[in-house]
Amino acid sequence: MNENNHTYDIICFMELAYEFDLSDKTQIEKKIKKKLKYHNLGNFDLERVEYLRTIKNDLFFEISKSTKSKYFKNSRGFANMTDFNLEKFLKEYSLKYEKIEKEDMLTMINYSIYLYYMR
């Protein structure tokens, strides 16, 4: 990952994470194009964005299960990042989505837990 943590996949994922409705799709894709240009990360790749969208939807579905998630360990009161088995989560998702760098996948998982579980 580059020094300021702005990889192509992370830039796209951070926008896709807030896409909850198909009507948001065009607006989100505009934001992605703008950020990619700003960070000099190349052209918009719809195939790649769709791949990342699949990951986002998968993470949203899994984390939204909360205590029923196969990655949920336990909770000691308030929602916490450690409520999930991050090691198992990362291992399985890195195998399932092998086009994604492991470091980026960890960022996506952590961000998703924060956004979909802890808020």
Image (cartoon, helix red, strand yellow):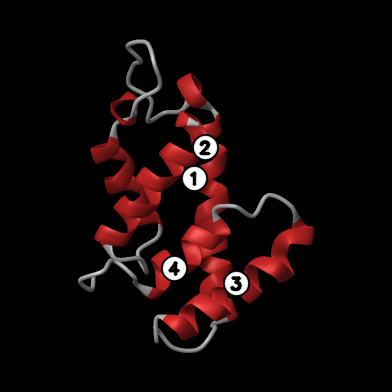
The alpha-carbon separation of the residues under discs 1 and 4 comes to: 17 Å
- Considering every residue shown, the one lying at the far left of the view is 3
What amino acid is found at the position of numbered circle 3 in the picture? Lys
The residue where tag 4 is placed is: 11
Answer yes or no: do the residues labelled 1 and 2 have beta carbons within 8 Å? Answer: yes
Q: Secondary structure at mark 1?
A: helix
- Work out whether mark 1 precedes mark 4 in sequence or the reverse, and give the earlier one: 4
Residue 89 point in image, percent of width and height? 33, 41
Q: Residue at x 55, y 71 (%)?
A: 49
Q: Check disc 1 and report the residue beneath it.
A: 59
Q: Could you tell me the amino acid type at mark 4?
A: Ile
The residue singled out by tag 2 in the image is 116
Q: Is residue 33 left or right of residue 5?
A: right
- Label 4: state its secondary structure: helix
**Going 54% across and 42% down the picture, which residue do you hit?**
60
* Residue ID for mark 3: 31
